[in-house]
Every structure is written in C-alpha cells, then in structure tokens.
Image: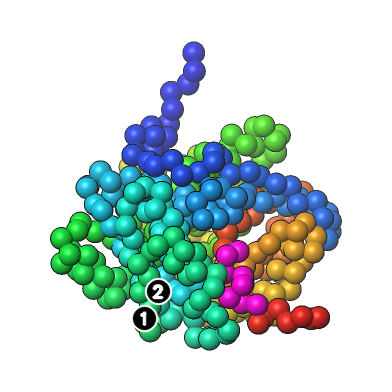
Amino acid sequence: MSAELPTYRKTLAALPKEDYLFGPSPIQFLPNLTKALGGEVKIYAKREDCNSGLAYGGNKVRKLEYLVADAKAKGCETLVSVGGVQSNHTRAVTAVAVASGLKSVTVQEKWVPIDPPLYAETGNILLSRLMGGDVRLNQETFHIGHKAATEAAFRDVEAKGEKPYYIPAGASDHPLGGMGFVNLMLEVAEQEQSLGVYFDTIIVCSVTGSSHAGTLAGAVLEGKGRKVIGIDASGKPEATKDQVARIARDTVARLDPEAVVPDEVIVLDERFHAGIYGIPDEETIAAMKLAAQTDALITDPVYEGKSMAGMIQLVKEGSIKPGSNVLYLHLGGQPALNAYSSYFPVGK
C-alpha cells in the first residue's frame, strides 16, 4: 500500500496548471567543467533552457503554467506584463499567450543603461515582435517592484473592452509565482532516483526572486536538508532577498500551513552581480567562456553568466565541499546573447 502524499504535494497537484513543457527538464552531468574545477565536486545542470518548445522555453515558461491557468479560469483575454528591453520573461509571456489563444501586452523598459548595436531590435524583443506581441518601449529604469507603466497598459486594455490579466516582472511577486519551481523540485527528486545521485547543493540565479523562492520552498517542504544558494544578479540584493523570503514563505504557507521557512535557509550570495543589473563584468564573461569551452554549456551575460561565476567561485574557495553533488539550475536566457555581441569582440 503506497504512502499518502504529503499535504503540500496534494495541494500543489490540485492547482490548475497549463501544459507548456516537454516534461521534466533534463539533468546533464558536466564532466569537463567538473574536471576543470578540480574534479572533487560533481557538477550537474538542470536544463530549464531546454524545457519547452515555446520560443526557446526557460524558467518563466514553467512559472507561467500556473499563472495562465489562473488567467483563463478568470476569463481574461490579454496578458499584461513588464521587463527590460531584453527580457526573457516578456518573451515567455508573449509565447504562452500565443500558445493559449490569448493576446499579450508587454512593457519593455530601460532596465539596462546601455545602447549597444541593435539592442532593442534583436534577441528576446525580436522574438516577441515575431510572435505578434504588442511590445511597448519606455524609459523607466530597473527595480523589481510593480511598475506604473504596467498599470497604464492594464487600464488601456480595459478601455478597449478586453479583460486583462496582470503578471508582475518575472512572474514573481504573485500568489502563484513560486509554484512552478516547487514542481521543479518534485522533478529533481524523481530524477535523483533514476540517476542514483543526491544533490546536496542547488545553485540558482536570483533577481525578481521566484525561481529561487520556489526552489527553496520545494526544498523546505521535502525536508531532505539540501542547501539552496541564490546568486544575486540584480545589483540590488537587499530588495531581492526580501522578495525571495516573502515569496518562499507565502508559497510554503499556501501549500502546507504548518511548514516554516527559517531565516538561515534563505541564502543569497551578492558577490557576483557586477554592481548592476544587466551588465556583465570580466568575471561574468570568464565564467561564460569556461562553461562554453568545457561542456558547450551556453549561458547569458545577464543571469546565468553571473550565477555560473558564483558557482565556480564557491567550488574554488571550498564553500562547496569536496564530495558534493551540485545541481546548477540553468534558467535559460540565451536569446539575449545577440544583443550583447559587442561584449565578445572577435579574437578576444
């Protein structure tokens, strides 16, 4: 007789959810990166960048499975959201809208104070336009909170007689924002059984916070004691850590009111954000090159390049102990690479 599912799993399974993923995203051992970092810490990647056929997938598509189900249940017709010019999130919002027969309005703000060639014409924003999204550029700068321009877009949709559904930046600060990554942790537990490995440490990039928070919530709820380390890429780590804590605790409370997220498990390493959101430094670029030139693992300069730099340093300095099995959550982001080509000059 099989054991009864824990409360959080029953609650999660009861939530309405769309089906945008191929299935569990694959876990890949990275033998050459493992060797390059001394061979005593085994490094694996959970390939969220390969999770869906919708416009290159990524972590936001996983999160949006829950939010779009909620939008459809409420009879909404247009998804309204916000991000930077090269936002992976707004590209994902546009993609899931197309796949679901909905419309999308995305506000694309000047979150990154640079203007390299074709920055607003290529990469993610090109894909959103190709998919027919209503893309609206403005000059508001970066912060992870709710934005005035998104409110204006929401009201504009209402004025046209349509019913909008608001999705905050990164699909994060939303009652369902952490659920997708609690589900990811259930996938990891099943994959560990088939792989014959236990991942004692998980590395995840953190900006708007719900990928980190959902992963942390899933780890707390499963109760195995694994460590989740967020690597800040926002350049505003205090705001990001506060949001991670709030989303993680809200997610856990919704899934199991008796569970608790203690302060000490909320870990955000703020050494690798290069001082600012969206701009890489030499350490970011070096990490991207090492991952690419060892296991052909392609990362981006905004998110995963910075979390890769963090993981590399944590292994080198011994903060991740020899004998550990590390699971690096590759959240996606590669479509932005073309917009950053000037950071990779030919011959350098």
Q: Which residue: 33% across, 39% down?
A: 16
Query: Which residue, given by chain and number where applicable, does mark 1 sit on?
Result: 138
Observer-nearest of 147 and 12: 147
Q: Position of residue 40 (x, y in %)?
A: 81, 53
Q: Where is residue 29 in the image (x, y as percent from the top left)?
A: 74, 47
Q: Which residue: 32% across, 52% down?
A: 102
Q: How far apart are marks 1 and 2 (CA)?
A: 6 Å
Q: What residue type is labelled 2?
A: Gln
Q: Give the range drawn in magenta.
A: 334-341
Residue 108 numbered tag? 2
Q: Which residue: 43% across, 23% down?
A: 4
Does residue 178 appear to the left or right of 71 in the view shown? right
Label 1 crowd bin: few (<14), some (14–19), many (20+), radius 10 Å: few
Does residue 160 appear to the left or right of 170 in the view shown? left
Residue 209 numbered tag? none
Hey, which residue is sitting farthest top in the picture?
A: 1
The quarter of the picture where residue 209 lies is bottom left
Residue 252 appears in the picture as rendered: no
Q: Which amino acid does label 1 sit on?
A: Asn
Q: Which residue: 46% across, 52% down?
A: 61
Q: Is residue 42 magenta?
A: no
| Circles 1 and 2: CB atoms closer than 8 Å | yes
